[in-house]
Amino acid sequence: MATLIRTLLAGALALASLGAITQKVRDQGYTDTEIRIGNLMPYSGALEIFGQIGKAEAAYFDMINERGGIGGRKIRFMSYDDLSDAANAMDLTRILVETDNVLLMFGSFGTAGNLAVRKYLNERRIPQLFVASGDEHLNQPSVYPWTMGWQPSYRDEGRIYANYIQAFYPGKKIVALWQNDTFGRELFKGLEQGLGKVAQNIRVDIAYDVDDQHLDGHVSILKRSGAEVFVFAGVPDNAAKVIRSAADHGWRPVFILNQMASSIETVLRPAGIENATGVITAAFLKDASDPAWKDQQDTGAWRSFLDKYTKAGGKDDAAAVYGYAAAETLVQVLRQCGNDLSRDNVMKQAAALRDYQAAALLPGIKINTGGFRPVEQLRLLQFDGRSWQPIGDVLDTAFADTSRK
């Protein structure tokens, strides 16, 4: 860890750094010419794929800076590699706060790392905004008023799948393969809670590690259960493997896929379009590889952003959309702050977004931050072999909020 910290201090991975500044940074993390924003991402290790989100956010801030920044101030995005290990979160956050003098922490990835630094940041009244996790415990404004999530909760996503199954496949046998971490457990818990008394229809569920080499064996076990509905919760690479494995076993259940692993380009194509046709997910963001959004992909802002993202090594379209939308939301908050960039005002403005629709959100889905849960809507979609087709209307995840524990 000491070597890691020395390396960071000597040559920090500041993806959108503006270089050395001559003006002393105020205690609040900004000057007349720049705003310092801190972030942690897994740029290496088991969760490296999600480090692409940080590269996308850096590309978005670069685009904003080229257009004059925010009120004449450029964004300095200081994003450090936590090596996919939440144990590094506290030391790296201390560096960002106490040495780099960031104004706020934004969009850090993962549940465990964000929970580890939450008390530290709240005690110092430093905004911990739009964390990249759907864990419900990261939205507790009465206890932690300086911490705010961004995406829908994993548990609510699971409840939506449960409601869909009950509405369209009542009485059918269900199996689940879920990633053995906070994300997977929360989504599976939501599935069970949503099913209520009929959770007994879950005949088999298997928890697996993100680097599990036996996914095919798990699929074989699940198939033998005779289940007609298969719920998967995991990372994109594993989702593609599992879809292909089910097809190789001659098994075509109703396949429900978590939204984090539903990209056409990075999941469904590698799985085989013929194997992925018919899969269902619940999403809140547009899929950049979906031809339904082709006209929007030709806009100047998106093309400028993609150019910067690919030059920075970006290669994941789902991460690109997530990073674009999250960064766009933060920029909106900072613009609302005007010239008052005190941390108190940053939190005030962060909690004041009303019916804000970031460009990358699906139509009808809006951001409202009054309850510290910015995105509380999802839309069920089914892949038809070419594009995602909506199933019904936009769903407010709060409708299933009756059994939170």
Image (cartoon, rainbow, N blue to C red):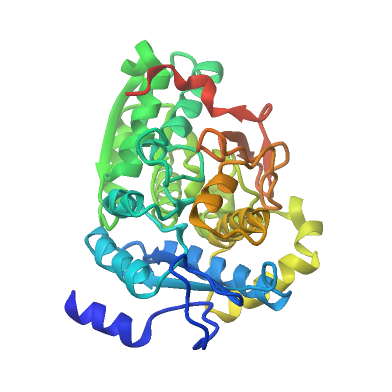
94 vs 284, left or right, is: left
Q: Is residue 78 above or below residue 195?
A: below
x and y, in percent, of residue 106 in the image: 47, 58
x and y, in percent, of residue 363 in the image: 73, 41
Quadrant for the C terminus in the image? top left
Please tell me which residue lies in front, 323 or 172: 323
Q: Residue at x 44, y 51 (%)?
A: 131
Q: Is residue 190 above or below residue 122?
A: above
Quadrant for the N terminus in the image? bottom left
Residue 83 appearing in the image: no
x and y, in percent, of residue 53 in the image: 50, 63
Please tell me which residue lies in front, 14 or 72: 72
Name the quadrant containing residue 75.
Answer: bottom right
Name the quadrant containing residue 144.
Answer: top left
295 vs 63, left or right, is: right
Q: Residue at x 28, y 43 (%)?
A: 218
Residue 4 appearing in the image: yes
Most extreme residue toward the top, as rendered?
197
